[in-house]
Image (spheres, helix red, strand yellow):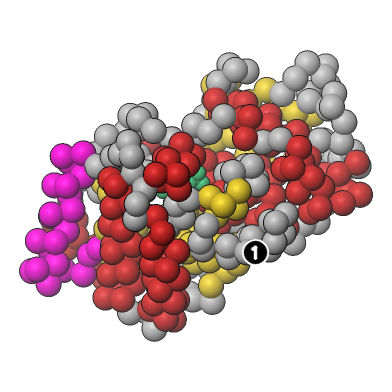
Amino acid sequence: MHESSSSVGGRAREAAGRVLGERRGTVPGKAGGEAYAPANIALVKYWGKRDEELKLPVAGSLSVSLGEWGTRTRVSRREDGSGDRVRLNGKELPGDSGFARRVSAFLDLTRPRGDFSVEVVTENTVPTAAGLASSASGFAALAGALDDWFGWGLSERERSVLARLGSGSACRSVGQGFYEWLAGTEEGGGDSYARRVEADWPEFRVGAVVVDAGEKPVGSGEGMRRAVESCPLFGGWKATVERDLAGMKAGLAARDWAAVGGIAEGNAMAMHGLMWATRPPVVYTQAGTLEAMRKVWAARAEGVGVWFTMDAGPNVKLLFDAADEGKVRGWFPEMNVVRGGGASAPR
Ligand code: PMV
């Protein structure tokens, strides 16, 4: 949650207007709205934007939603009109904090009038010990709560486009299961949204291994910007993603762990390779990250079906089947596990 609110401006409000149309001018018919959205972990990563303000990616990506790990958000009117107020996990955020500003900038996209102030109460259900603070579930839940409150009746695709304007990866947090973010080609971003991949895999597990739960040195927005501008390997990224997306979708359809785990791990390594080759480099990997990676390779060499992925941070997420949880825990006793991949997870 490090991007500045200045990244949301006139073109983003126009893009939100294309989703909401006349509906943006209406005031809510009830006192408040509420929604839950799961966090997600990309199996094929999003790294690099072709449009900063509209958060349009250079390439597609694909993620698994994290069941009961996510964000629940409630919205209601602040009658005194004295500006938005955000409570996160029971604490009121200072109005000038990075996250409060991003939330307000997002609300600017949808408010019926400038003086319409909103109270946002948001709780993360991801255990702090999972080291997985995510803006994705936050903006997807906010878009869902506003939809509930205003009664817009958004389709999942419309909700995905709207959530994307808050945080790119949020467009993949609109439901449970596996979601593919279609990069799209339209300048206004109307065709850049995530849709559910038809694959149900209730035994899919994600284990979180925390290496360092502290603030990351470079936010994802800044890291991506630098990669697009200066990474000599970036030219090959789109083709890598396209190949990995095709292999991943085939692997998910066949519930083929070797394909799914292998591609997810390779794609994460390729993204981190881009980060290392960026000038100046963007290195999230720590000694503990490398240690966990080596442990995964050692476990696999002994026949345990476990793979890893990492995002813009040092923490490692393990991917494995429910049947192997005991064996994986033998290697990583401290991991936190969540069920992903199933339509039966909470909505
Ligand atoms: O949407 P953002 O700006 O939080 O970017 C997320 C980028 C990664 O987590 C590193 C990759 C991904 O696809 O989620």
Residue 106: x %, y % from top left: 68, 36
Q: Pointer 1: what residue?
A: 185
**Which residue: 60% across, 26% down?**
100
The kind of residue tagged 1 is Thr
Q: Nearer the viewer, residue 259 or 46?
A: 46
Q: Is residue 336 left or right of residue 64?
A: left
Left or right: where does residue 329 sit relative to residue 213?
A: left
Stretch in magenta: 286-307
Q: Is residue 177 visible?
A: no
Q: Is residue 218 magenta?
A: no
| Image quadrant occupied by the C terminus | bottom right
- Residue at figure coordinates x 42%, y 68% from the top left: 239
Q: Nearer the viewer, residue 324 or 310?
A: 310
Query: Horizontally, is 14 left or right of 167 in the view?
Result: right
Secondary structure beneath disc 1? Answer: loop
- Dominant SS of magenta comes to helix
